Image (cartoon, helix red, strand yellow):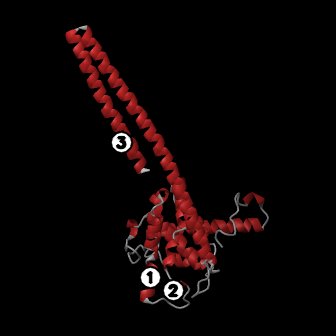
Amino acid sequence: MSGRIKFIAGTGEIIRAVGISAMAIALAAYAMVLQERTLSVAVLGAIILLVAASAMLQVSRAVRKLHQEHRQTYRAAMRAERHYFKVLRRMMAAIEDREPYTRGRSKRVGYLARRIGEQMGLDPRQCRLLGLAAQVHDIGLMAVPDRILNKPSRLGAAEYQTVQRHAEVSYRILEPLSFLAEVLPAVRHHHERMNGTGYPCELKGQDIPLTGRILAVADAYDAMTHDRPHRPALPSIEALHELRRCSPAGFDPDCVAILEEIMNMRQLRRAHKAAGDPAEAPASPISHEAIA
């Protein structure tokens, strides 16, 4: 988008410069006519004016053509980005389908991150983009060997360092997607911790982007409430308790509180639905691929 703005501003400067030049030529020609008042000078002045007008017309046509070509290039670039994103999302689905404990994880985390963002007052566009970025935020795990990802025991120091690199790798893979630019810091910093003990940059508190703090909570909650090779899933209430226990040192307490509200509302809707109260049933039921 910034490149598009620069392009439009650049063409505007061209038109302004040529326009000023044409006006100067016209004024010079007019001064010549007033000073000499002869037929030959009048004809020369008219010719100069025609040349200036023709130059302006040609520049205007060239600029319009450039704008049209730029729009076509921009649309082609956006189509390419959308295709690239779809490929990445399919790759994530294929990676997750290899193991039962990761199946559907990207969609669940994307849904949660978007809901937390909405409740925290982020604008709808940013919430939508955060949800999309969250769906592929762990694409960098492709660079981590399966023997490490699926290790049933505690990771060693070297193995943990290998896993830590996935946030930076994910960021680099997604960096070409300009439409995600404003939320990409969330991908890079979703393993930062409020006390500065996280990675990759050891950011603290408010230095961590809000979208990163949101994604950290959504990611951790989903990880805790689903089986892992080294431990079974925690019930939702225990996972929320653990997030509260790790706040504010680890997680943003505001994000945790919002997640708890979302989970409580979901449980309340389930209870009303089980009781057969249609007035309290959600208008758009949460799919089985959302939060389990």
Q: What residue did someone put label 1 on?
A: 162
- Residue 170 x %, y %: 47, 70
Q: Quadrant of the C terminus?
A: bottom right
Looking at the picture, tell me which residue is in the foreground, 46 or 67: 46
Dot placed on the residue nearer the N-terminal end, 2 or 1:
2
Q: What residue did someone put label 2 on?
A: 148
Secondary structure of the residue carrying numbered label 3: helix
Q: Nearer the viewer, mark 3 or mark 1?
A: 3
Give the side of residue 43 with respect to residue 237, left or right: left
Secondary structure of the residue carrying numbered label 1: helix
* Crowdedness near tag 3: few (<14), some (14–19) or many (≥20) residues, C-alpha within 10 Å: few
- Residue 143 x %, y %: 48, 78
Q: Amino acid at mark 2?
A: Ile
- CA separation in Å, label 3 and label 1: 45 Å
Q: What residue did someone put label 3 on?
A: 10
Kindly check if marks 2 and 3 are in contact, taking CB atoms under 8 A apart as contact: no
Dot placed on the residue nearer the N-terminal end, 3 or 1:
3
Q: Residue at x 43, y 33 (%)?
A: 61
Regarding residue 1, the answer to whether it shows in the image is: yes
Dot placed on the residue nearer the N-terminal end, 2 or 3:
3
- Residue 218 x %, y %: 54, 70
- CA separation in Å, label 2 and label 1: 9 Å
Q: Residue at x 40, y 50 (%)?
A: 3
Regarding residue 261, the answer to whether it shows in the image is: no
